[in-house]
Amino acid sequence: MGVSVVSWNIATRIEPWRELVEMGADVALLQEARRPPAEIADRLEIGPEESWDSHSWNSEWWRERGWPALYDRWPMVVRLSDRVEVEWFTQVSPDGWPTENKISVSGIGTITAARVTPKDGSTEPFIVASMYGRWAGPHPSIEASWEIYADASVHRIISDLSVFIGHANSRTHRILAAGDLNITYGYGHGSGPYWDRRYETVFERMESIGLEFLGPQRPNGRQAETLATGEPEDSENVVTYHLPNRTPATASNNQFDFAFASRGFHEGIEVRAMNGVDEWGSSDHCRLFIEVTK
């Protein structure tokens, strides 16, 4: 039967949790998540806190800045059904030498990883990673022409993912990574050639370590009615995000959510953006529905 996976940035909201447990999926890869509401907590499993909360491997340096917490939203891997077993990797600081059941993480609130094993043996176990391209800002000592960017966080995620790749033959790996990268595919978010190239390097790096781009792309999702500034005429991007002043019906020009899988393993994976107006869900991002069939 395979394994069904949902990737979704739920924007710290509560209602998406209720929608998740009604979907019938096996695993969720969430971004910008807080704890689920108490009334459904027994219908899912978010794993040990050490697998997703970066407080577990950081000192309290952030208190000196007067912050109430290091961060308040996290990528999570969530078990939604009893058809699968999930073994979460504990996050540790980036010491460069991974140990069993641990993952070195170099970006706060950017990645959570786990191993998924179908109980019916329909597919072999595989690694999943929930990715969030967290926004960052330039150093205050320089004169900058932009305020924020997310590609640096995504490059850290790629480096963290690479610990699960130990052979030049990508078919020896079974890795599925998905999430909100806060960057665009095929162009630089309308900011000109410099950002076109910066964003392109993210997708090139994924390919270089053996992770195939799975989109979703047309026809596996609804396209915007008009192209974004700088978006190529032949773009097959689909809409996965709407601005605060818009709705799923008026969402335009933004695909920030993507999926990748190990080359070879990707041949048994289908990805679709649940971005129809009636299926979008209660977040500003739509869901990616991912089916692993072999």
Image (cartoon, grey):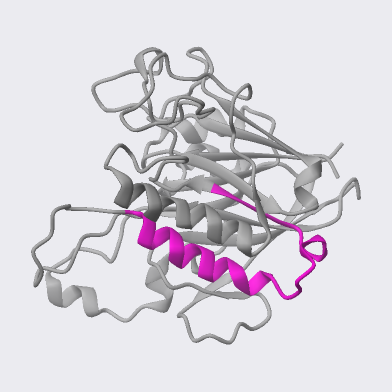
Is 25 left or right of 7, judged from the image as shown?
Answer: right
Q: State whether residue 51 appears in this view.
A: no
Q: How many marks?
A: 0
Residue 226 percent location from the top left of the image: 38, 17
Q: State whether residue 225 appears in this view.
A: yes
Depicted 198 relative to depicted 247: above or below: below
Residue occupying the point 31% across, 55% down? 72
Is 80 left or right of 179, judged from the image as shown?
Answer: right
Is 117 left or right of 213, judged from the image as shown?
Answer: right
Depicted 150 relative to depicted 217: above or below: below
In this orientation, which residue lies closer to the viewer: 232 or 258? Answer: 232
Residue occupying the point 57% across, 28% down? 273
Residue occupying the point 54% across, 27% down? 236
In this orientation, which residue lies closer to the viewer: 229 or 93? Answer: 229
Q: In the image, which residues are magenta? A: 150-178
Tell me which corner region of the image, top left, top right, bottom left or bottom right, holds residue 180: top left
Q: Quadrant of the C terminus?
A: top right
